[in-house]
């Protein structure tokens, strides 16, 4: 499954929905769903958010990497402290009810300016600002670039924080290849 369309179809099938029903969940007609699955069109963030609420693995759809669904539903959610260490924080203590606020949170967690993040995602700073203000939603291509920059797309779309294990895997994947190799060698060394 090399493209978003085939992975989207795979998730729809796994969840047991028809194209009509899955499209309706995402707020689109059956023809749009068909075009998404053929790769002729790309779904937007509002569609992805809606299907995530029904159990679709959006990270898998966008990137091809499956997330740990069980771990993402733990009671204690993780966030970054200013020192970069992990700390448990209750979700009710974080006021992030919209994609816009979660997108801004992730950008700040990555210590990027709006201009830097916009450039990494291949869009203008003005468009990025609209996303963070809630007057626009990023499409799947922008979300794919956001993920490559280290952003947590699943969190942005669903509001669910990753588990410590998921966060560790995401950080490992974001490391340069040479660092990944060094980490793997260190883990293979017997202590």
Image: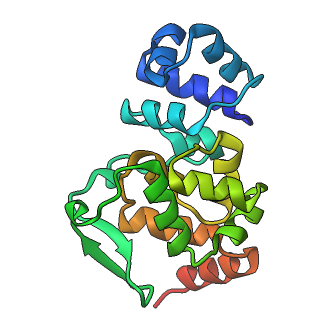
Q: How does the figure colour the protein chain or chains?
A: rainbow
Eyeballing the image, is 114 above or below 54? Answer: below
The picture places residue 164, in percent across and down from the top left corner, at: 37, 68
From the viewer's perspective, is 114 left or right of 157? right
Q: In which quarter of the image is residue 188?
A: bottom right
Eyeballing the image, is 56 above or below 143? Answer: above
| Quarter of the image with the N terminus in it | top right
The picture places residue 182, in percent across and down from the top left corner, at: 66, 83
How many labels, in total? Answer: 0
From the viewer's perspective, is 150 left or right of 47? right
Give the residue drawn at x 67%, y 26%: 6
Judging depth in this view, the residue of 94 and 165 nearest the camera is 94
The picture places residue 102, in percent across and down from the top left corner, at: 45, 58
Q: Quadrant of residue 34?
A: top right
| Quarter of the image with the C terminus in it | bottom left
Judging depth in this view, the residue of 16 and 89 nearest the camera is 89
Eyeballing the image, is 178 above or below 157? Answer: below
Give the residue drawn at x 57%, y 79%: 111
From the viewer's perspective, is 64 left or right of 20? right
Give the residue drawn at x 49%, y 21%: 27
Give the residue drawn at x 52%, y 40%: 58
């Amino acid at each position: 499954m090399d493209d978003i369309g085939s992975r989207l179809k795979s998730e729809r099938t796994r969840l047991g929905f028809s194209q009509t029903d899955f499209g309706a969940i995402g707020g689109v007609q059956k023809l749009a769903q068909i075009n998404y699955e053929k790769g002729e069109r790309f779904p937007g963030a509002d569609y992805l958010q809606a299907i995530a609420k029904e159990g679709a693995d959006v990270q898998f759809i966008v990137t091809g990497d499956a997330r740990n669904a069980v771990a993402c539903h733990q009671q204690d959610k993780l966030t970054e402290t200013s020192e970069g260490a992990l700390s448990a924080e209750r979700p009710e203590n974080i006021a992030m009810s919209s994609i816009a606020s979660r997108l801004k949170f992730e950008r700040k967690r990555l210590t990027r300016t709006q201009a830097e993040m916009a450039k990494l995602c291949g869009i203008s700073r003005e468009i990025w600002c609209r996303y963070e203000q809630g007057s626009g939603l990023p499409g799947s291509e922008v979300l794919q670039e956001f993920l490559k920059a280290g952003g947590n797309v699943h969190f942005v779309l669903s509001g669910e924080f990753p588990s410590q294990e998921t966060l560790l895997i995401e950080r490992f994947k974001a490391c340069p290849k040479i660092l990944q190799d060094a980490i793997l060698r260190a883990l293979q060394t017997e202590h």
